[in-house]
Structure formats: C-alpha cells, structure tokens
Amino acid sequence: MPNRTKRRKPSRSTKKVDSTPKEKKSSGRPTDYDQVRCCRVARAVLEIGGTETDLAIALGVSRSTVFEWKGKYPEFVFAIVQAKAVVDAQVVSRLLDKALGRESITEQKLVKTKDGYKKFTLKRQVPADSGSVEMWLYNRRPEDFKKKQTIENTGVAPVQVLLYEPASAVATGTLQQSLEALAKVQKEKATQ
C-alpha cells in the first residue's frame, strides 16, 4: 500500500494587511553613473558627431540607460545639449559656406620635375551648391520654400469636381463627346 499523506486545506488567515505606504527600497545593483566621467565622455563623443547610441557604447551601457540617465540627471542632459550645439554650429557654418560658395580653396601639391620635387600652390573657386541652398532655405524658411504645394480656392464660386464620366462618353472615347456629356451632367445638377 502506497504511503498517502493528507493534503492540508488552505487556512483562512485573519491577518490584517497594512495599507500604509512603505519607503521604496532600491533593489538591484548600484548605478554606473558617475557625473564627471559621463559628462566628459558625452562631450567627447558628441562633439565629433557621435550619436546617443555611440555614447552608450563609449560608456559601456545600453541605449535605454542613456535615456534613463537623461531623465534623472540634468547635468548629463546639459553636457549632451552643449556638445550637440558645438557640432551643430560647425555643420551650419560649413553648410552656409557651401550654399554661398567659397571664394577659393588653396591646395598645396608636390610635383616631381627634372630638378626634383617642386611645391605648387593652387587656388580655385568653389561655386554654390544648389542642394545646400535648397536645404538651407527649406529649413530656415519653410513657409516660403516648402516642397509640398497647396492650392486654396479664395474665389466666390465653389469648385465642384466630378469623379466620373457618363458611360456614353467613355464608350465612344472622343473628347468632344466627353465635354458635352460633362456639360449636360453639370446642367442637371444645377437645376436640382
């Protein structure tokens, strides 16, 4: 005969539950955030054009941790914003140079001759780049240079657009018949 043990019935507890909020205990490992190191790394990475993903790799943490730190530590956000502003100013300056065209670029070339090597200085004009001009105007004055055009009807008469053609006009396929059928439909609509 197998040994059978009795199962206990769950007891009904009469304990009162304490509903007062308790202090939140931090669980898990301590943060890797070090203000001096993180701000210094943020400036170094972002001033050379790095992204926040590059910053996370440089700090040895995940990208979500960088975003979490941005929410917790205002000095970290300030370092990121400041570093991005430096590189953005450099890009804007170069874009402006490219959009306006530069007076000249000086290049030094070393050329082999019969007597040895000679150094030549070359100067050349750089014309304005139309793509840079377009991007500059589109971002600086989007109300005047937007790519999408909108047409507004400011006239008194409402515009009515018909999205169908009568079957007779489609069957014959001539433009004159299509126009006559369209005029007929418009007259019928006007009388109704």
Image: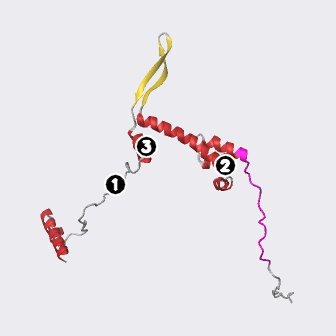
> Picture coordinates of residue 39 (x, y %)?
68, 45
Instruction: Say if residue 56 shows up in the picture.
Output: no
In the rendering, which numbered label is found on residue 149?
A: 1
Specify which label sits upstream in the sequence, 2 or 3: 2
Q: What distance separates the C-alpha of mark 1 from that of mark 3?
A: 18 Å
Name the side, left or right, on which 46 lies relative to 120.
right
Main SS type for the magenta part? loop
In the rendering, which numbered label is found on residue 136?
A: 3
Which three-letter amino acid code belongs to the residue tagged 2? Phe
Asked if the stretch drawn in magenta spans residue 35, the answer is yes
Of residue 38 and residue 168, the one placed in the foreground of this image is 38
Residue drawn where x is 51% and y is 39% of the image: 91
Residue drawn where x is 39% and y is 43% of the image: 134
Q: In which quarter of the image is the N terminus?
A: bottom right
Please tell me whether mark 1 sits on a helix, a strand or a loop: loop
Please tell me whether mark 2 sits on a helix, a strand or a loop: helix
Which three-letter amino acid code belongs to the residue tagged 1? Gln
Specify which label sits upstream in the sequence, 2 or 1: 2
Toward which corner of the image does residue 185 lie, by quadrant? bottom left
The span picked out in magenta is: 18-37
